[in-house]
């Protein structure tokens, strides 16, 4: 009987998940697939690249979403404490992946940037996505190691240095400033949640603003071919109508899409801007298509679901039984929050155009799979903490 009861508890553990979190994730995935099909079917049906198949991108994204969900459930049943033993490997692996972009035949160059790694027989993937997961694990382990002395500014800086190095490598090798900022921002927010004082963050924020202003001034005065395009984006953001035929074109078309949607939109599938004015509307600017086809109501629903997802992630962090689990959940929370906020700010022209995707909506198989792996880690943190509380309650009753 005791063995049977133990087996039932093990089975219950394996099949028990945070239903609210899973429902939020599945809702966003399904909604995202519908919008990807709506935003891509015209482009796919007119392009030889997609075999003139209007469902090409939908089927591709669906395949990766299913793979991601399977990986999520697998990771959800792996004791999250074990990830701590791989922290150093995660850091070294991230550095190696980024350096592999420099290897001829492995790094794939597209639009002047090398951000994809080609794996013979398996296709290609965007290096930034596994690096985000790896750096969440590494940062969580490193912050835990120095948590008792993290109130020392020197120790805090020491904790941030490895992430800063990886971020600089991403920027210099893959020419991907947005990902570099997100990777550093994730670790920064994780440390912020643990650090007992606020003044260092104010100081670092001020230093960051001064540094950014200095970089902009330097590039404006001594701009080269590599930095000129970033300055052009800032200028286009500040004065879009002076650059409406080139640099600001996509941003203005996104605003036209948002403005034409009204309260309830033109109807699913009826976007005009996706027919050409917004290039590759199924990528970074997909939220503009949501606004045009579903209006303020549909866009608000998407935002509310992201808010609910973030609420659930933060709740798991608050209820985690130890600091490492709390930091893993905060890392995933920070990743999703940064990408959602930056993407919406870019689409609504509150921020200069940059390549930040909208989680679960923008087309991209690698991003979907690795984000769902992150969700799996959070599910395990929640499950482990909940079952431990229930076990302690049972033991207390027996006493």
Image (cartoon, rainbow, N blue to C red):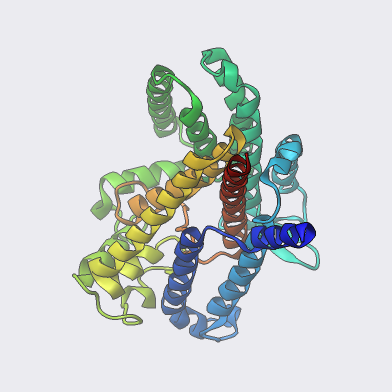
Assign the C terminus to one quadrant of the image: top right
> In this rendering, would 114 be left or right of 261?
right
Q: Nearer the viewer, residue 100 or 91?
A: 91
Does the rendering let one see residue 113?
no
**Quarter where residue 303 is shown:** bottom left
Q: Nearer the viewer, residue 368 or 179?
A: 368
> In this rendering, would 103 be left or right of 386?
right
Assign the N terminus to one quadrant of the image: bottom right
**Quarter where residue 87 is shown:** top right
Q: Position of residue 396 (x, y in %)?
A: 59, 40
Answer above or below: position of 389 versus 115.
Answer: above
Answer above or below: position of 2 versus 389.
Answer: below
Q: Position of residue 49 (x, y in %)?
A: 59, 78
Q: How many marks?
A: 0
For the point 56% across and 54% down, which residue is it?
A: 375
| Residue found at the far left of this picture | 263
Does the rendering let one see residue 142?
yes
> In this rendering, would 152 be left or right of 263?
right
Q: Position of residue 301 (x, y in %)?
A: 31, 65
Q: Position of residue 119 (x, y in %)?
A: 77, 61
For the point 21% across and 65% down, which residue is it?
A: 259
Q: Nearer the viewer, residue 291 or 5?
A: 5
For the point 49% across and 84% down, which residue is it?
A: 46
């Amino acid at each position: 009987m005791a063995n049977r009861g133990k087996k039932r508890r093990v089975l219950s553990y394996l099949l028990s998940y945070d239903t609210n979190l899973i429902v939020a994730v599945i809702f966003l995935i399904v909604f995202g697939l519908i919008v990807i099909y709506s935003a891509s079917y015209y482009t796919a049906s007119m392009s030889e690249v997609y075999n003139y198949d209007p469902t090409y991108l939908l089927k591709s994204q669906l395949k990766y979403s299913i793979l991601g969900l399977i990986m999520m459930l697998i990771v959800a049943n792996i004791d999250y404490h074990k990830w701590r033993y791989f922290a150093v490997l995660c850091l070294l692996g991230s550095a190696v992946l980024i350096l592999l972009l420099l290897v001829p035949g492995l790094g794939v160059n597209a639009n002047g940037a090398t951000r994809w790694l080609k794996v013979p027989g398996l296709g290609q993937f965007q290096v930034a996505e596994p690096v985000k997961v790896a750096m969440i694990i590494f940062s969580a382990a490193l912050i835990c190691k120095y948590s008792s002395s993290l109130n020392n500014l020197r120790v805090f800086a020491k904790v941030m240095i490895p992430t800063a190095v990886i971020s600089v490598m991403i920027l210099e090798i893959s020419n991907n400033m947005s990902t570099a900022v997100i990777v550093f921002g994730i670790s920064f927010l994780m440390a912020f949640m643990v650090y007992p004082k606020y003044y260092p963050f104010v100081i670092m924020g001020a230093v960051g603003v001064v540094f950014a202003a200095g970089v902009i001034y330097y590039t404006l005065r001594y701009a080269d071919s590599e930095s000129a395009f970033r300055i052009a984006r800032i200028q286009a953001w500040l004065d879009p109508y002076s650059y409406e035929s080139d640099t600001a074109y996509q941003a203005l078309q996104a605003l036209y899409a948002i403005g034409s949607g009204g309260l309830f939109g033109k109807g699913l599938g009826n976007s005009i801007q996706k027919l050409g004015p917004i290039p590759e509307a199924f990528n970074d600017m997909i939220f503009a298509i949501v606004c045009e086809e579903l209006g303020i109501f549909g866009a608000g629903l998407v935002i509310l679901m992201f808010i609910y997802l973030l609420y659930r992630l933060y709740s798991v962090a608050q209820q985690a039984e130890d600091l490492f689990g709390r930091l893993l959940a905060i890392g995933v929370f920070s990743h999703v929050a940064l990408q959602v906020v930056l993407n919406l700010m870019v689409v609504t022209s509150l921020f200069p155009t940059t390549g930040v995707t909208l989680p679960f909506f923008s087309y991209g198989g690698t991003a979907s799979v690795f984000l769902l792996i992150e969700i799996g880690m959070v599910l395990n943190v929640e499950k482990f903490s909940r079952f431990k509380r229930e076990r302690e309650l049972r033991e207390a009753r027996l006493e």
